């Protein structure tokens, strides 16, 4: 790799890491009291899913360990935001569904963070954001393939 290509790579990933950190900080501050970004992410995923998910599927979706997703699900279940129940077809598995309270919590969180996200997109410009999405998606895809 040439020095220019290496410098470009380092600059790209430095910007991505910093943007990720700043976005997580801003969104975490805006979330309703007691909700973590990981909680919102799981609730949002379940709200947009066509049906129940297993903890293993959720761990794979979010690229975290089963232990990490179990911890998040315990907190969400304790708060009444998800239901974790046996899979009636395979008693060894559990299924996770979002509860009505979980939908309300997700909607409240989305209402809190949507203006922040919309402001960033408006300031950058929708066309520039639209052009960046395929590049970011391809970067993610490359890491999923190699991981």
Image: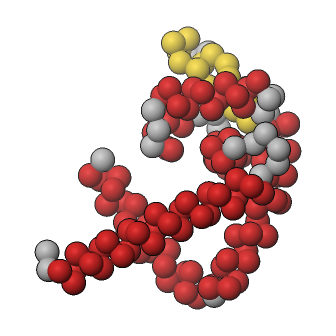
Which residue is found at the position 55% from the left and 87% from the top? Answer: 128
The image shows a total of numbered marks equal to 0
- Residue 3: image location, x then y, percent: 17, 80
- Extreme residue toward the top, this view: 91
Name the one closer to the observer, 120 or 134.
Answer: 120
Left or right of residue 30: residue 37: left
Q: Nearer the viewer, residue 134 or 33?
A: 33
Percent position of residue 2, x then y = 14, 80
Seen from the viewer's position, the closer of residues 134 and 64 is 64
Residue at 79 percent across and 39 percent down: it is 34
Query: Which color mode does the image show?
Result: secondary structure
- Residue 86, position in %: x, y? 63, 16
Q: Position of residue 44 (x, y in %)?
A: 69, 49
In the depicted structure, whether residue 117 falls above or below residue 37: below
Work out whether 143 lies above or below 122.
Answer: above
Q: Quadrant of residue 123?
A: bottom right
The reply to whether residue 110 is visible in this rendering is no
Q: Could one spot residue 73 in this view of the protein?
A: yes
Residue 13, image quadrant: bottom left
In the rendered image, which quarter is residue 8 located in?
bottom left
Quadrant housing the N terminus: bottom left
Q: Residue at x 69, y 61 (%)?
A: 26
Residue at 66 percent across and 79 percent down: it is 121
Q: Is residue 72 left or right of residue 109?
A: left
Up-down relation of residue 67 to residue 40 (above or below)? above
Vertical placement of 87 versus 16: above or below? above
């Amino acid at each position: 790799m040439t020095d220019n290509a290496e410098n470009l790579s380092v600059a790209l990933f430095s910007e991505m890491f910093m943007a990720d950190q700043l976005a997580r900080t801003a969104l975490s501050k805006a979330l309703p009291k007691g909700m973590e970004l990981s909680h919102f992410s799981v609730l949002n995923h379940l709200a947009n899913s066509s049906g129940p998910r297993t903890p293993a599927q959720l761990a794979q979706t979010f690229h975290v360990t089963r232990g990490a997703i179990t911890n998040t699900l315990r907190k969400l279940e304790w708060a009444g935001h998800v239901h974790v129940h046996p899979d009636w077809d395979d008693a060894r598995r559990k299924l996770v569904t979002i509860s009505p309270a979980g939908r309300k919590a997700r909607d409240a969180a989305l209402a809190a963070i949507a203006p922040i996200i919309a402001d960033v997109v408006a300031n950058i410009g929708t066309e520039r954001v639209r052009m960046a999405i395929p590049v970011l998606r391809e970067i993610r895809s490359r890491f999923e393939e190699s991981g």
